Image (cartoon, rainbow, N blue to C red):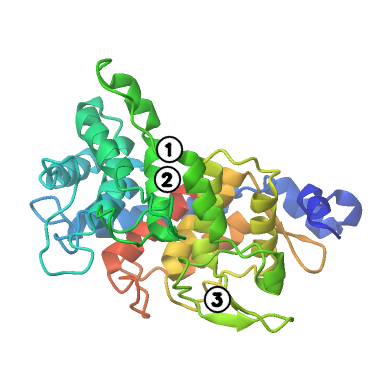
Amino acid sequence: MGLAAALAIVFTSSGQSADDSAKGAMQPAGGLDPALRKEVLQSIDRGLTWLATQQREDGSWSDTNFPALTALPLQAFTASEFKDRQKVVDKAVKFILSCVQANGGIYREMQGRKGGGLSNYNTAICMTALHSTGNSAHNKVILDARKFVAGAQYFGDDEYKGGFGYDKDTQRAYTDALNTFYTVEAIKTTANVEDSRDRSEKRVDINWDETVKYISRLQNKPEAGDQAGGFYYNPTDPKAGTVTNNSGKVVFRSYGSITYSGLLALIHANVSKDDVRVRSTFDWATRNWTIDENPGMGQQALFFFYNVLSKSLTAFGQDTIPAKDGKQINWKVELAKKIISMQDSNGCWENKVNRYWEGDKVLATAYCLVALEKLAK
């Protein structure tokens, strides 16, 4: 069966047993049944309650050198109906605003560290979080942050062209899929704030054409064999290693979290869902479907994988994943159950494989809560 046919499949009652039909009557196609949704909401409340106890008096969480680590849990609260939501949000916003720099970036200076204070990474995530509060009082900060982030786009004459890296030093030949994804998400999400920019100022945006070209370069092509359609980290560092294809060529291994990041970045860039790049990404996702690990990376970056999976498939509008046996997997149900099963009794989540900071319970919990909030909608 081809990809187009797989995308068009609807699992109809003609192939269902009586038990399957009964389950379908209780559960909306692609959604959560009332009982599971209740479990999800209870899990969210436990997680938010735990996060609230971890917030410092100055409003921060985790490592204060990186305000993004406060902005990510902030987004979990702004999307919630938590009883002390506004108190927690106000404190977090105050801390983030204390990190605003004169150049418009939202970060803290760190001397002697490669990538410095990760100025682009922190600014992109923080401006998205500020926007999620819905408070127009933050528009000026967001507008300045948009200008800062847009100015970080790299235009060197090499394979990194069009992308974004951790910092704003555009003379450094380095960009990657993760920071490009966060930047694209931030610029797309906050686009409406440009309407409040003074008419005497030029509206700010990134060069979307070059961004899409860069994202596309990080996608494995058909000649990569079973890696085709998936994404890797950047032009020189695959993160998930390499494999040798059938013709003997060494290719970068595709992996889950960055592939779903690539899918969402393409959607944010208004690439058609019928475009071969989008379709082949979803095809890779179906061939490599699992939530027991981050495909290609094992347990590394597992909770970020859950986070971006929930956002990308929601944006793609795909409620089910075609399984190898011809049935359809309700990925929202499967993912919700999986995330809930991994929650600690105190309400938090923690990745025992502490790579990409996921041993930080605050970060891991924020990733999971945002994913669950997407699933509960």
In this rendering, is residue 7 above or below 230?
A: above
Q: Is the C-beta separation of discs 1 and 2 under 8 Å?
A: yes
Camera sees residue 375:
no
Name the image quarter holding residue 176. Answer: bottom left
Residue 73 or residue 45, whichever sits in front: 73
Name the image quarter holding residue 186. Answer: top left
Q: At which x and y percent is residue 182? A: 38, 51
Under tag 1, what secondary structure? Answer: helix
Residue 22 or residue 28, whichever sits in front: 28
**Residue ID for mark 1:** 188
* Lateral position of residue 317 relative to residue 110, left or right: right
**Residue ID for mark 2:** 184
Alpha-carbon distance for marks 1 and 2?
A: 6 Å
Other residues around mark 1 within 10 Å, as few (<14) / some (14–19) / many (≥20): some
Residue 246 or residue 285, whichever sits in front: 246
**Residue ID for mark 3:** 296
Is label 3 or label 2 in front?
A: 2
Under tag 2, what secondary structure? Answer: helix
Under tag 3, what secondary structure? Answer: loop
Name the image quarter holding residue 175. Answer: bottom left
Identity of the residue furthest to the right in this view: 14
